[in-house]
Image (cartoon, coloured by chain):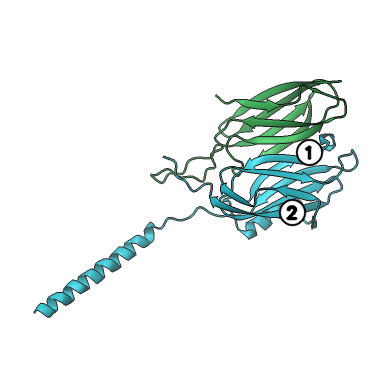
Chain colours: A cyan, B green
Amino acid sequence: MRKQDESTRRQFLGLAGGAAVLGAVPIVTLQPAEATPATLAAAIRNVVGAAVVRTGKVKLDVPPLVENGNTVPMTVSVSNPMTPDDYVRSIHVFNEKNPQPNIGNFYLGPQAGRAQISTRIRLADSQKVVAIARLSDGSFWSVSADVVVTLAACTEEVI
Amino acid sequence: MASALINVPAKAKRGEIIEIKTLMSHVMETGYRHTVTGEVVPRDIITSFTCRYNGTEIFRADLFPAIAANPFITFFTVATESGKFDFEWVGDRGFSETASASIAVE
């Protein structure tokens, strides 16, 4: 009799534990859709079309390790003269793991004098940031930088 | 409510490359955050920024939710003549702000 009691108690605990685990599974919330290397590639294709993107000329200044992904200083400069015949037409910045692959598009002209822009960006995770420059002759140049983020943007809840 | 901070040198030599710094106060709500009750906070960002120098567009930017709150943008231009820089920010929910700064070129 006593033996049976113990076994039912064990069974009960086992069942309760199992139910708790099962109940817990649906509580795991779905992460917001993430940009993936594939969507990053698609976003870049959207801008460059079928053109070949070469590496070089562009310099991307972003801290390699940031504490707060909500505001990351970033500077993009292109070593290219800014003359009426040869200038940087635009600078496009992309990321790999934010919900959206685009960060910003910046359109310059020959009157800029220096092809350099800076701004502050958000990074949702440790990831790769890619900057692409489009020159007046239609060529594209790119550079990428890896950033480690300790506190990600976008994850906190609004109260 | 919304306010802009602009930094343009007051004086410059003709042909000099000058740096322009702009900051617009704005939440830049991404549209990916949730409240504690699970509702999505709707997107509210500045989508476009333009700078004109005596009426000619010299710089334009498309902004995305990945731009940090209170967008800070700096860029360069060649000081060609005395005049005015006009800045314009356009965003979601009919957001539209303008600011201007003048420069004397010797």
The chain under label 2 reads A
Residue sitting at the far right: A85
Which residue: 17% across, 72% down? Answer: A9
Quadrant position of the N terminus of chain B in the picture: top right
Structural crowding at the residue carrying mark 1, measured as other residues with C-alpha within 10 Å and reported as few (<14), some (14–19) or many (≥20): many
Q: Amino acid at mark 2?
A: Val
On the image, the x and y values in percent for residue A147 come to 63, 53
Earlier sequence position, callout 2 versus callout 1: 1
Residue sitting at the far left: A1
Identify the secondary structure beneath mark 1: loop
On the image, the x and y values in percent for residue A84 come to 89, 38
Judge by depth and name the residue closer to the eye, B95 or B3.
B3
Structural crowding at the residue carrying mark 2, measured as other residues with C-alpha within 10 Å and reported as few (<14), some (14–19) or many (≥20): some
Which residue in the protein does label 2 denote? A143
Q: Amino acid at mark 1?
A: Leu
Which residue in the protein does label 1 denote? A108
Judge by depth and name the residue closer to the eye, B103 or A32.
B103
Q: CA distance from mark 2 to mark 1?
A: 18 Å
Which of the labelled discs sits on residue B36, or is there none?
none
The chain under label 1 reads A
Q: Are marks 2 and 1 on the same chain?
A: yes
Which residue: 25% across, 70% down? Answer: A15
Identify the secondary structure beneath mark 2: strand
